Image: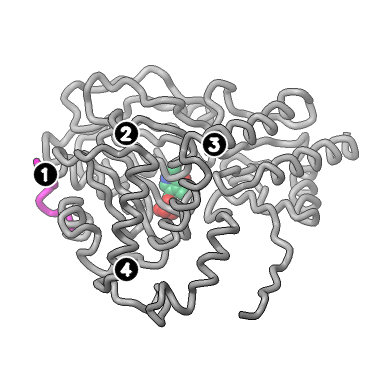
Amino acid sequence: MKEVIIMSRVYNFSAGPSMLPEDVLKQAQAEFLDYNGSGMSVCEMSHRSKWYTDINDEAEALLRELMGIPDDYYVMFVQGGASTQFEAVPLNLLGKNNKADYCVTGNFASKACKEAKKYGDIHEASSSKADNYIYIPKQLDVRPDAAYVHITNNNTIFGTEYKSAPDTKGVPLVSDMSSDILSRVVNVNDYAVIYAGAQKNIAPAGVTIVIAKKSLVDEDYTLPYCPTMLKWSTQAKEHSLYNTPPCFPTYMAMLVFRHLKKLGGVAAMQKYNEEKAAILYDYLDSQDFYKAPVVKEDRSMMNVPFVSPSEELNAKFVKEAAAEGLVTLKGHRLVGGMRASIYNAMPIEGVKKLVEFMKKFAAENK
Ligand SMILES: *Cc1c(COP(=O)(O)O)cnc(C)c1O
């Protein structure tokens, strides 16, 4: 085969879609035209073929192993992104007594809550909106008869993160882990449902992971008008093959899971991510040119927002950083400034290079 020339790759700090491990991209490239002797691409093959059902099975088995998902949970690979699960969660669970509680800790949390309000009696168990979401409220006002409590594990835009599952006093906990799944060890048993879009920490957009307690799905608390496609029981029973699944993103997810396993699993990733985040936060804490708005104890290990002294300098920062191969650092419009997303696939070298650039930029623009 002809040697492929790889153009110089940048350090991409995008909040999502974001970087994928280079080994995984190369593997996908190597088998893109002929997957496993099939003579065709994963993009071209039947989802009922043995090649694909093997991918589907291996992806699930590896995710179970990496996260320590117990046997009494279903694992599903579905379409529609995390935003579709904002609908699916109430549609699958509100049948119990029509009540659910939401923790409003950011933009996606607020969107999830807004969708649920279309279907039932929704109560805000906590909110940090009045402080522009710079912290995670520790006190939850949970109704004991709520069908579930919903949290957003990591607030991608505002850069806050739950360090552990909050105490919901026995009410089933549903967590949107789109932007921190597989970044650190979690005890799956603390959650009734975990869902995540793939494009932050796993794979290209297109596949969404749903991990749900079998008892909750089997007891069937779905609202009567829940669309078949959004019903977890449909997807679980058909082993994510009810209709044509997102084959290629699921295959990419499988490659990423293999890669994570080779690196030592989620515990090893957590150690690496802690090291990366510390480099950036330690620097931010050591100087007064940049400000990091988030309350220290709630800082996200994945998304790090910070601002320079002025709008002009923010724009200049983003432009000059890009010229050095540090790209997509512009902050979300709701926060402004900059945001460095440092998911699993961001190498530590990228974070070190960013901090070196930050130091130089501060010195030149003081
Ligand atoms: C990106 C993101 C979403 C939206 O995901 P889609 O797959 O684009 O629908 C939802 N929640 C969180 C926490 C996110 O980071």
Three-letter residue code for mark 1: Asp
Q: Residue at x 77, y 34 (%)?
A: 309
Q: Which residue is mark 1?
A: 218
Q: Which residue is mark 3?
A: 158
Q: Nearer the viewer, mark 2 or mark 3?
A: 2
**Which quadrant of the rendered structure holds the N terminus?**
bottom right
Residue 277: image x %, image y %?
Answer: 62, 33
Q: Nearer the viewer, mark 1 or mark 2?
A: 2
Q: Which residue is mark 4?
A: 52
Q: Mark 2: few, some, or many residues within 10 Å (few <14, many ≥20)?
A: some
Q: CA distance from mark 1 to mark 4?
A: 27 Å
Q: Residue at x 63, y 49 (%)?
A: 13
Indicate which disc residue 287 carries.
none
Q: Is residue 32 magenta?
A: no
Q: How is the image coloured?
A: one colour
Q: Which residue is mark 2?
A: 188
Query: Which contiguous range is marked in magenta?
Result: 219-227
Q: Is residue 23 left or right of residue 122?
A: right
Q: Residue at x 27, y 73 (%)?
A: 49
Q: Is label 1 in a helix, a strand or a loop?
A: helix
Q: Mark 4: few, some, or many residues within 10 Å (few <14, many ≥20)?
A: some
Q: Nearer the viewer, mark 4 or mark 3?
A: 4
Which residue is nearer to you in this view: 223 or 163? 163
Counting residues from the start of the chain, the first of labels 4 and 3 encountered is 4
Q: CA distance from mark 1 to mark 2?
A: 18 Å
**Disc 2 C-beta below 8 A from ligand 1:** no
Q: CA distance from mark 4 to mark 3?
A: 38 Å
The total number of labels drawn is 4
Three-letter residue code for mark 4: Tyr
Residue found at the very far bottom of the displayed protein: 39
Three-letter residue code for mark 3: Phe
Residue 202: image x %, image y %?
Answer: 46, 51
